[in-house]
Image (cartoon, rainbow, N blue to C red):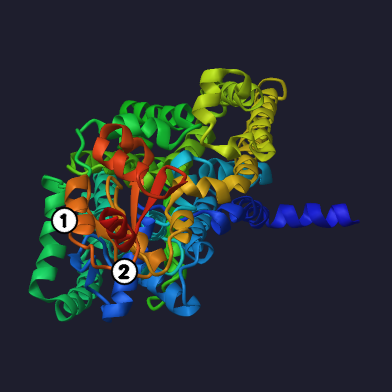
Amino acid sequence: MPKLEIDNFLTRHPLAVTFCFIFLCLLPVMIMRDFTPDNELRYLQIADEAIENGNVFAFTLDGQAYADKPPLYLWIVMLCKLILGKHSMFLLSLFSLIPAFVIIAVMDRWAGLEKVSDRISVAFMMMTCALFLGASVFLRMDMLMTMFIVLAMNSFWLLYTGKGNRRKQEILMPLWIFLALFTKGPVGILMPPVAIICFLLLKRKGKEIGKYLGWKTWGIIAGLCVVWFGGVYLDGGKDYLNNLLFHQTVGRAVNSFHHKAPIWYYLVAIWYIVAPYMFLLVGALIVSLINGWQVPPLARRASRPIRENARQERSCQPDETSCHPERSEGSGDKETLFCVTIVSTFVMLSLFSGKLAIYLAPIMPFMVLLFVEVLRRTGWKKWMTWSLAVPVALVGILALAALGVLFFGDYIPKLAELTAPYSFIGSWTLKLATLLLLSGAVFCLYYLFSKKNPSVSLMFLGASLLLAVYSASSVLPQANDWIGYGNLCKTIPAEARVAAVQVRRPLPMKVYLGRELVDYQKDFQAFYEAEVAGMTSSDKPLILVTRTKKLSSDEALAAFVENNPHWTVGPYIAVTYHPQENISQEEE
């Protein structure tokens, strides 16, 4: 009886069970991981400054205007800080993981799969795409923006097919588009309209563009933008508003001052952001493009019988909003929409000057769903088997090689020297993680070739990846030395002044230290003249933070470290300098 109840619950709620499994696997990472300096710690610093200065729409970083990002995600960081009185990795991680779950749930409903194994395997497949998994636990606004974009495209689909409450979706679609803009920026407001326009033009329905992107849609978006920009003007003034609207949008798109990359950048990035399913998903995209090229859109258009449409139209009352003739989904419209969304977004992002792999996050759910639609149309093909088998076999080979390093690395001098700084390398949980990856690869290949069951193969692969993350996360307390500044800042005395040389982006350390520090960038001589020669009257100790690997290229810095008490935390060295003690020694 208990087994029957469990089976029934799994049958009724496969996504709920899947989400619980994913949450438990990622929970240790969400609790124990340190904030990364490049982005996460900067967001915390921006939130701290906003709370301290009373800003709501206009933000600062180190006292300088920061108009790089819209306010929604920063509001979330501020709210979490105000509720708990401190920054919580777990709480903030939920605002990446929950949007990921919402995306999977919306796409699951959109795909309309019936078999439990298919629904679970597709959920695992989407969740364990490399970039999707990373964006689900790291503190960035990309997953939140992707969720709003998916919701906007789903609202368009409901309007296009005549499903649900039309008046409700006509309000929700522009609201989702605005929230995507309000979360990350221009991509949020560009991607859904561009995809919708391209889809309608391809379907020879250009005259219907105004039906979905008319005055009502743009009026709602414009009204919300007026409220936002008005708040920015009142909070930050004309200069900040100009920076937000022009410098951070046109500048990034035309001649980016950050992350500038060649136009072909995403042609390379696409292969690793959806690993290990890259051959399967890119292959499905190519198959869909070939099919669309060979079969004209008008030939693929299907409609319900005239009498059925007429009967449905007569049954609708003029004041009803939930009864509309549904367009046939058997015509391939869904596959076309997914394909057009991927291609149009890919081309649009490639034309922008600023590029990062994470910017492709919004197309990943559509790539997985496009594969589902291609699979529904063609069935499982031999090329699909090998497209999955090759990267899985590679995962198995890499896991086997990693096991060799973990078990026998100490007996190989060069490997022992390379891994010596990382004491956690010998942890049994890392060995277990690699064993889980190897086992998952073996079972995946077994069910793929012997049992001819791709769904179970995908479930084994996804589950093994998540379990490996769970097992490996136990080393995070030690690995945090290399991830962030938390462990380092715990060793710095509360009364000490702090300076940094040869450290990338050290200023966000103030989140941990509770006070400012001075960044001398790569100029040790400037540090020496200002802090050593120029501060001899100070009675407070000075802590200099630098990187171990920089000592070999800077002799003066290396001599300073050698002549003063110091300690090492991961890749960093903290040096203590006492002005009064050094004066006494010089006088003697």
Q: Position of residue 377 (x, y in %)?
A: 50, 33
Q: Are circles 1 and 2 on residues that touch, CB within 8 Å?
A: no
Mark 1 Cα shell of 10 Å, populated few (<14), some (14-19), many (≥20): some
Q: For residue 160, which quarter of the picture?
A: bottom left
Residue for point 63% across, 32% down: 434
Left or right of 471? Residue 164 is left
Of the pair 248 and 479, the residue shown nearer to us: 479
Amino acid, disc 1: Thr
Of the pair 287 and 489, the residue shown nearer to us: 489
Residue for point 29% across, 55% down: 588
Left or right of 535? Residue 113 is right
Residue extending furthest front?
A: 588
Residue 113 visible in rendering: no
Which type of secondary structure does the marked residue at label 2 adopt?
loop
Residue for point 53% across, 30% down: 419
Closer to viewer: mark 1 or mark 2:
2
Q: For residue 584, which quarter of the picture?
A: bottom left
Left or right of 93? Residue 511 is left
Residue 515 visible in rendering: yes
Q: Position of residue 206 (x, y in %)?
A: 21, 50
Residue extending furthest right?
A: 1
Of the pair 351 and 394, the residue shown nearer to us: 394
Q: For residue 204, which quarter of the picture?
A: top left
Mark 2 Cα shell of 10 Å, populated few (<14), some (14-19), many (≥20): few
Residue under circle 1? 249
Residue under circle 2? 539
Amino acid, disc 2: Asp
